[in-house]
Amino acid sequence: MNTTVLPVNPRYPQAKAIAAAARALQQGGLVAFPTETVYGLGANAMDADAIRRLYRAKQRPAGNPLIVHVADLAQLEGLAVDIPDPALQLAQRFWPGPLTLVLKRHPALPDLIAPQRDTVALRLPAHAVAQALIRATGHPLVAPSANRFARPSATRAAHVLADLEGRIDLLLDGGPTRIGLESTVLDLSRQAPVLLRPGAITLEQLRAQLADVRSGGAMLDLDDDDALPESPGQYRRHYSPRAELLLYEGEEGAVLAAMQDAVRAHAGRGRRVGLLGALPDLADCEQVSPGEGQEATGRGLFAALRELDARGVDVILARLEESGGLGAAINDRLRRAAEGRIIRV
Ligand code: TXA
Ligand code: MG
């Protein structure tokens, strides 16, 4: 399959490009497109064959549930049932935006969207290209992150091509995505609201609207598409670079000293070391900084991990963020990628 790449203005998407992409989706094809979080790989949510194709293209196990993307609140009608008031309040407050709500599923939806569940995850993205594409297609779109299974999510068109070229019909290239971390996922289908995945809408923001949101679902979120199955009951591997990722937690000076030791030790064994960040005092390692400050770090995190992989390092050293605000989401992605390799100094 040839993957067509169409450049598109991220704020004022060209009607011609959107029409071509919508046509591909209406014919059961797969189209990657930018959202404010990461690139999504879209398929018509009402077309079970297209969804099957999507699982194959991503090499994603079929049991993992998908997020359905809508262009306005009215589209919720045919997708979810028994929508609780808090869901509508949160949608009013945070949509369009990086918040996904898990609700009870409408029976008209293909079962493949969330096999063996009676729920559906819904999101209204805050990106002109995503909205225009959903409207032009005339159907909601399922869109997992547009990366190959077990790779970091794609935040640039080049990442999508690196993972999926020749496996998808079309890519709308709208430049780098603004947030860079996948949406916050909140489950409102059960008695108590549970945060399943932290994101740019923070736990603090959610609790300001809905006091009893529980966190802690995230570590047990075994359903993420980027998971590699390991032994049953274990946490799985997510968002992983090819290199081994080692995380450091602690006071800045102590972390720097520990990293210096680690660089020497690994280099001594002939391994190439990478650093996620910029530390002029740290010699003999490849350094790629996602950016300064939490927003820039979130935006550049996956690109930096991919860049370090491209440079061929064997091991990547990184420091965990402060845990408040966006730090929770950044640390969540880092921890999953590190598979628990955290060094406290
Ligand atoms: O920002 C995002 O959410 C991006 C963009 C493209 O919208 N999409 C994305 O999709 O990250 P994906 O498939 O990579 O991640 C979907 C997450 C997974 O953690 C999955 O387990 C969860 O949402 N999810 C989907 N449906 C669910 C359901 N019915 N119940 C619980 N969790 C669900
Ligand atoms: Mg994903």
Image: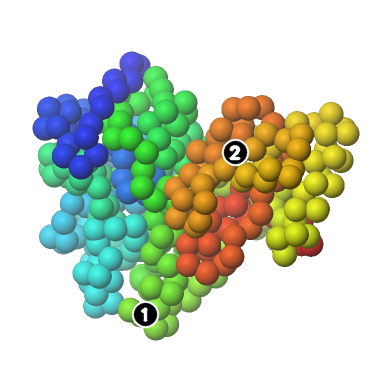
First reached walking from the N terminus: tag 1 or tag 2: 1
Taking the spot 53% from the left edge, 64% from the top edge, the residue there is 328
Report the residue marked by disc 1: 208
Does residue 264 appear left or right of residue 23 in this picture?
Answer: right
Query: Residue 253: horizontal and vertical position, in percent?
Result: 75, 59
The three-letter code of the residue at mark 2 reads: Val
Q: Nearer the viewer, residue 131 or 142?
A: 131
Report the residue marked by disc 2: 288
Taking the spot 42% from the left edge, 82% from the top edge, the residue there is 212
**Secondary structure category for the residue under label 1:** helix
Query: Residue 293: horizontal and vertical position, in percent?
Result: 51, 56
Q: Which residue lies furthest to the front in this view?
A: 280
The three-letter code of the residue at mark 1 reads: Ala
The N terminus - image quarter? top left
Taking the spot 59% from the left edge, 60% from the top edge, the residue there is 321
Q: Which residue lies furthest to the bottom in this view?
A: 211
Q: How crowded is mark 2: few (under 14 residues within 10 Å), some or many (20 or more)?
A: many
Query: From the viewer's perspective, is residue 177 above or below residue 189?
Result: above
The C terminus - image quarter? bottom right
Q: Which of 279 and 262 is in front in this view?
A: 279
Residue 237 in sight: no
Confirm or reject: label 2 Cβ below 8 Å from ligand 2. no
